[in-house]
Each structure stands twice: as structure tokens, then as C-alpha cells.
Image (cartoon, rainbow, N blue to C red):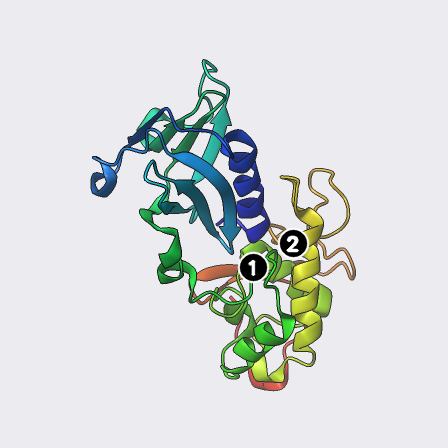
Amino acid sequence: MPEGDTVWNTARVLHRALAGARITSSDFRVPQLATTDLTGWIVRESASRGKHLLLRLTAPDEAHWTLHSHLRMDGAWRAYAPGERWSGRPAHLIRVVLRSPGAVAVGYHLHELTVLPTAEEDRLVGHLGPDLLGDDWDPAEAVRRLADHPEQTIGEALLHQRNLAGVGNLYKCEVLFLRGVSPWTPVGAVPDLPGLVTLAQRLLAANRGRWTQSSTGSLRRGQTSYVYGRRAQPCRRCGTAIHKEELGDRVTYWCPVCQPEQPAQKRTIG
């Protein structure tokens, strides 16, 4: 699933391509929006909220509307020059095409595609916790929300967007490694929640504006992560083989030496 920084980058791509432009034609390829026509609408801005994309528009009657989409695991937006060949994704995955005089925006395999009044955006994103890359980032509020469920594992809690918006599986694994915390630690037993959420925000912010995500400081292939995607490879700190296991409905990667489980957390690892 795309992380918050990937969604932020995608919003900026759309903003650069469409902001200020008038839509010359729109083509929605989902049943619920099949008859929607945005021709003549002006794009005000493209923004992100956690993992949600919000394309804000002004209709000919000057009403403000938002085209909302979610990338989930496999969605993507691409911007092309007029006449440029669309590449990289099969045509049957296209869910929407927006054309303007200077660009064509194509949404592939988008989820939760909705057009609603901008004033009602909270119906879709109001439940989210503080956005790690947003103007509303509030580490104290993120800590408060996490602490409301002290028995939940920290590995699961970090992925709940109601706690803090933007962390995905990659940053979950990397932040917990860097803080030396086992993913199975109950939230209530994490020694420094403020330090953990602050580090998460710093990592996402450091990768904002580029597509290669790195928690190690290196952008070289195979050197961008400490534990994520490195099952059975040696830990970069201690040399122990990195483990991979299911936690909730997602896999997690961790070093059993650098992120030791407390006695009450011990499990049989297959």
C-alpha cells in the first residue's frame, strides 16, 4: 500500500499538471460516476490527507466540489502531455481520465472514487488522525490516540489511520527498528511514544518530493531499508537474520536482537 509520502507526491504531480486549468473533457469508467461530466470545471488544487487524494474543483455555477480517490494497494495517477502515449498500466485498469489544454490526468485502479461538495470532505476524511505531512500535524494528538488503545500491538496501531494518517507497512517496520521496539509490544508498554511518532514524521518528511523511499540515508538499490523487505538477510546493525511474520492482516519485518520481545510477549516463531 502506498505510504503517505507517495500519496503526497502524487497530489503534487496532479497539482502541477492541472491546478488553474479548465477541464475540457472527463471520462469516468466506474458505474457510480459513469454519467458525471466535469467539462468546464476549473481545478483549484490537488491535496492529500493521509492516504486520501482530494482534487478540488470549481463548477461553472461557482460551487466547490472535490473528486476524492484512494490508492489502496495498487492505485495510481499519471499525468501526460496532450498527445503523449499513456504507458505503464493496462487500459482496462483506467478509472478516470481528465483532460485539460496542457495535460491529461489518468487514474488507474482507483478506489473510493467519489465526487462530493468540498464542504463535506470530512464525511470521508474527518475520522483520520493527524496527518504526518499535513499542516495539522500534532504529535501530542497522535500519541493521545495511540494511547487510547494500550493493549493493541504497536505494529498494528501505527497502521490505523485513525491514530495518525500516513504510516504504511514500510515506515511501520523501519520506525520500530530504529526505536528498538518489537512490533508485538503493547502500545501501553512502548517506552517513548512521542519519540516514536516524531521519528515517523521525520522519515516521511525526509522522503517527501522523491519516489525512492529511504530510511537509511542511502538511495542505492538494496540499501534503502533496515528491515523492510529484507527477510533472512543480515541485520545492518548486529548481523542477525531479519525475520518476517504476519501481524494482524499485514506482514512485518524485524530484527529479533535489536528489537527484543519482553517475556510476556514471547511467541513461538515458525
Residue ID for mark 1 = 167
Q: Earlier in the sequence, mark 1 or mark 2?
A: 1
Q: Position of residue 114 (x, y in %)?
A: 32, 47
Report the side of 206 relative to 153 (left or right): right
Instruction: Answer above or below: position of 115 versus 124.
Output: above
Q: Residues within 10 Å of mark 1 (few under 14, many from 20)?
A: many
Question: Would you place residue 41 above or below residue 155 in this image?
Answer: above
Question: Which residue is found at the position 71% from the left and 69% from the top?
Answer: 179
Disc number for residue 180:
none
Question: Residue 67 is drawn in which quadrant?
Answer: top left
Residue topped by disc 2: 204
Q: Closer to the camera, 159 or 6?
A: 6
Q: What is the residue that sits farthest to the front in this orientation? A: 61
| Marks 1/2: CA–CA distance | 8 Å
Residue located 34% across and 33% down the image: 96
Q: Position of residue 113 (x, y in %)?
A: 33, 45
**Nearer-the-camera pick, 24 or 215:** 24
Considering the numbered disc 1 on the image, is that residue within a helix, a strand or a loop? loop
- Asked if the residue at tag 2 contacts the one at tag 1, i.e. Cβ–Cβ closer than 8 Å, the answer is yes
**Secondary structure at numbered mark 2:** helix
Q: Is residue 4 above or below residue 175?
A: above
Against 217, is 184 above or below? below
The answer to whether residue 186 is visible is no
- Total marks shown come to 2
Q: Amino acid at mark 1?
A: Val
Q: Is 212 in front, or is 235?
A: 212
The spot of residue 32 in percent (x, y) is 22, 43
Q: Is residue 104 visible in the rendered structure shown here?
A: yes
Residue 94: % across, % down: 34, 31
Mark 2, other Cα within 10 Å: few <14 / some 14–19 / many ≥20: many
Q: Amino acid at mark 2?
A: Leu
